[in-house]
Amino acid sequence: MQSRMQLESVLRRIDGRGYKAYKDIEGTYDFGNFILHIDHVQGDPFASPSRIRVVIPQKVAGFPQELYSSKPRKKGLEDFLTRQISKNIPKIVKGNRGTGKSGQISIISVGQEILNRTSVLVSDVSVEARLTMGLPARGRTILSGQAMEMLFGELPRLVEQSLIYRNLDSDALLKHVNLAEDQWVLRSKIKEMGLVAFVANGSILPRRSGVDDRPMESGAVPFKSPPELEVMVKLPHAGKVWGMGIPKGITLIVGGGYHGKSTLLRAIERGVYDHIPGDGRELVVTVEDAVKIRAEDGRRVEKVDISPFINNLPNGESTTSFSTENASGSTSQAANIMEALEIGTSLLLIDEDTSATNFMIRDARMQRLVHKDSEPITPFIDRVEELYEQLGVSTIIVVGGSGDYFDVAHRIIMMENYVAKDVTAIAKAIAQEYRTDRKKEGGGQPIRITQRIPIPHSLSLKGRKKIKSRGLDNIQYGHTNLVLDDVEQLVDVNQTRAIGDIIRYAMENYMDGKTTLREIIQKVCRDIDEKGLDVISPFKGLYPGDYAQPRPQEIGAAINRLRILKVKQESVK
Ligand code: ADP
Ligand code: MG
């Protein structure tokens, strides 16, 4: 390891030289209170900024062990420290000074979720933060003076104010960590209680806008459980909390337009993740494998057995091994369900706003006019009970438009002026009085889930082709653009970035033409659990600070949407 003085002397030597000379500062330096790793120096001032790490011995950082003594607490602490750095950067770092990215110091951007990330890592031994830094230049001429200001002035101050325990707001920190643990406990408790989701009384569900995930600022009506569904859960830190428990089975959310149905469902969708204090959804928690299902016309589908929902297509195409470059609303929704079941889920979440009507319902009159023989679709209403009875898969559906679902629902919640009411008894009485006379379709055959095996060479990246994520919804995979716009539970750009590298990791380690997609994803997730998210990085010795952990469901969704994917179906045993 070199000293800080040595770094300074290299910087003095290369001052005024061409940008490439910055390469000379790659290495590890002892800064006294911390160690600085300059892992990768950018090629020019406009390129992705240089990657650095600061590692502070725990003896110096001084975090009490109880703050990272379990996985959820460690995740909460690391998330808090990431946000602390993010908050302090604009206060401490002067920012742009020179060409391109000169002068910037950054850490990943974060949203409302507490996720497992690689931006900050805490252990008994040390606290490590992974940052990027735009090494300053004018044109392509190195500005060592500015670099020294950043490395010897700003960086140590940033470390001092963000990563040393005694300098932090210990109450806010403890609250963050405790909340992360409470959410983890709550998610496991609801399962023991036979629930699929819990929405605490007082939760603020609406968001600031369609593009701003922070809570609505004023005028939000806090959530209150209907008495019939109210349950109490005891949490380690929050103590006793009351709220609406949605049991397993089939639950409808009904109500007039604009009365808050989709807002409730969206909060439940996001309940698979933990949220930061003040989010409003801190104690809105859903079973972790819940999947939002929607229509997604235009998507590609590769050999999915959609026959539980679609049969006898007019072109005679198979639906037990259905492929298309351009799915319709109904076939895409059927494929989305079958793929979710294949990867594994215990709860489907469906909103009429984003569903294909003909997939959801065919009423009695339409059944009379269009004979079943010329209708390929078995609507969801005729499968939803079997999904629960045969496979134990629950469903929560938002429907404002069709009362036919009253017959199959176990529970009906009405949203009225943003207030939830249990209207199960009334709706069931209406269903008795006004029979729909529709005939159940599908004939009750068992719902078969066919596992599929990816063919490895279909995904191979020859030569110098790269994987690069762009924002939340796009991954450039070699020459193919993978579009994830309609994967609604993908919430963080850093998850998208991780998924890109996970696909490569899965291909290099587990795709062998024999292993099913479900098993491949399980193996990758087990590696991540055991070894940390760094394991998916393709560059050994380069420590990415910009991964956030995706769920198996979103990894599967991404692979299934790759337009070059080829699979074979596993033969039925
Ligand atoms: P629906 O699906 O029933 O048509 P939405 O859930 O889309 O209704 O909500 C309609 C509007 O009401 C949205 O702009 C949403 O932000 C707002 N909203 C939803 N829930 C609340 C609430 N609890 N308090 C205040 N406004 C809300
Ligand atoms: Mg709606």
Image: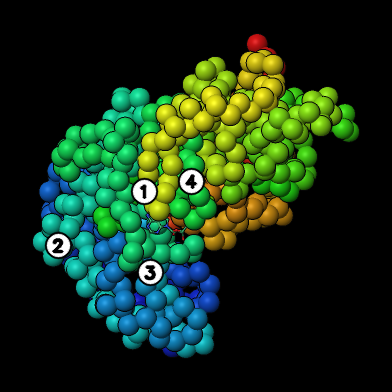
Front-lying residue, 468 or 393? 393
Q: Residue at x 31, y 24 (%)?
A: 192
Q: Does the rendering let one see residue 166?
A: yes
Front-lying residue, 414 or 541? 414
Badge 4: how crowded within 10 Å, few (<14), some, or many (20+)? many
Q: Residue at x 72, y 25 (%)?
A: 307
Which amino acid type is marked by label 2?
A: Asp
> Residue 164: x, y in percent?
17, 61
Badge 2: how crowded within 10 Å, few (<14), some, or many (20+)? few
Q: CA distance from mark 2 to mark 4?
A: 44 Å
Q: Depth-wise, is mark 2 or mark 4 nearer the camera?
A: 4
The residue tagged 3 is: 106
Counting labels gives: 4
| CB contact under 8 Å: marks 1 and 4 | no
> Residue 396: x, y in percent?
49, 36
Q: Secondary structure at mark 2?
A: loop
Which amino acid type is marked by label 1?
A: Val
The residue tagged 2 is: 169
Residue, far right: 315
Front-lying residue, 121 or 474? 474
Question: Which of disc 4 and disc 2 is earlier in sequence?
Answer: 2
The residue tagged 1 is: 419
Q: Secondary structure at mark 1?
A: strand
Q: Depth-wise, is mark 4 or mark 3 nearer the camera?
A: 4
Residue 207 vertical placement versus 392 (above, below): below
| Quarter of the figure that contains the N terminus | bottom left
- Residue 400 picture quarter: top right
Q: CA distance from mark 1 to mark 2?
A: 37 Å
Q: Does the rendering let one see residue 507?
A: no
